Amino acid sequence: MSDYIFGRVLTAMVTPFNEDLSVNYSVAEKLADHLVNNGSDGLVICGTTGESPSLEDDEKYELLKVVKNAVGDRAKIVMGTGSNSTSKAIKDTQKASKIGIDGSLQVVPYYNKPPQEGLYQHFSLIAKSCPDLPIMLYNIPGRTGKNLEAETTIQLAQNLDNIVAIKEASADLEQTAKIKILAPSDFLIYSGEDFLTLPMMTIGGVGVVSVASHLVGNQMQSMIQAYEAGNNLLAQEIQQKLYNLFNIIFCNTNPIPVKFALQLQGWDVGGVRLPLSSLPINQCQEVEKVLKDLSLL
């Protein structure tokens, strides 16, 4: 485990389903254990990759308990407890904190597109409601319709002691660099996109909240460790080797492709809940080819 509060590689874990699309807690337990044994310093549950919009609240808390039981103190558990309702985000974060989490992932409120002042007040109130709980902000404007601007992130990091990190998935390296330069030195920046992990580390990122680590967790960890050890050529080699995988697992809406990839590997993670849908046959073939090329099947 890295000395960083959440580690280096956090897997944004899928939520396994049974054939009837109820949550398969047994497979969730096994998958969590597998991920921690294969490169993951931590797990992010009930995020977008975990299909949080279509999970019921009781399913989320039961999943938390199951995953906690599976990994014990071997990995950090971060739970997505954000919402586009500030009061609901506070309620859900407080409840998860009482059950026991190592951190909360707080997404930028989606659909209602608040101004930056609204975002500042939203995250501030959540942080103050659980002052001892580390908070990771989550900026993903492609899904939320709103960018958390660097100035707002910096202000939050400066003024709220428990806002300690950001999952930055804007693909804006200039914005990321500005956060690194002006936020407190111990504020942690995680890539929210597998492909940008290495580029973001060159400007101060510490790791990744990853989807690809379901399949190549050890390789992701090796890439980061190589870069940190000054072996840039090895880090680049790993990045280049995984390039096609980084692309293909986002050939359709996440987590549709990665769930299919896990199924190919024999993981009974089931399908996806509507409004998500199955992977088209041509993309299934493309995913299978990339996995075979990387000897992942």
Image (cartoon, rainbow, N blue to C red):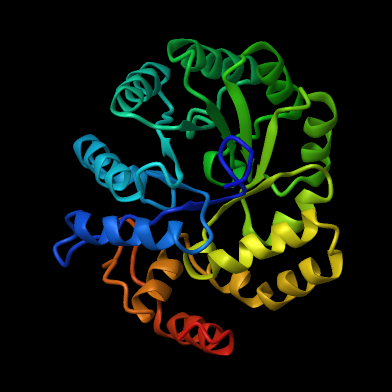
Question: Residue 209 location, x and y as percent?
Answer: 56, 49
The residue depicted at 58 percent of the width and 35 percent of the height is 5
Q: Quadrant of residue 139?
A: top right
Residue drawn at point x = 52 percent, y = 50 percent:
41
Query: From the viewer's perspective, is residue 142 above or below residue 37?
Result: above
> Can you name the residue that lies furthest to the left here?
20
Looking at the image, which residue is at 30% across and 50% down? 70
Relative image position of residue 135 (x, y in whole percent): 53, 26
In-front residue for pair 240/5? 5
- Indicate left or right for 77 with 204 as reference: left
Q: Is residue 242 above or below residue 81?
A: below
Depth check, front residue: 68 or 63: 68
> In this rendering, does residue 273 appear at all?
no
- Where residue 173 appears, as percent x and y from the top left, is 80, 46
**Splitting the image into 4 quarters, where does residue 216 fall?**
bottom right
Seen from the viewer's position, the closer of residues 254 and 241 is 241
**How many numbered marks are there?**
0
**Left or right, 278 with reference to 195:** left
Q: Position of residue 10 (x, y in %)?
A: 53, 50
Residue at 14% over, 63% down: 20
- Viewer-closest of 124 and 144: 124
Does 4 appear above or below 249? above
Is 205 situated above or below 218? above
Q: In this orientation, does residue 213 appear?
A: yes
Instruction: State which quarter of the image contains the C terminus.
Output: bottom left
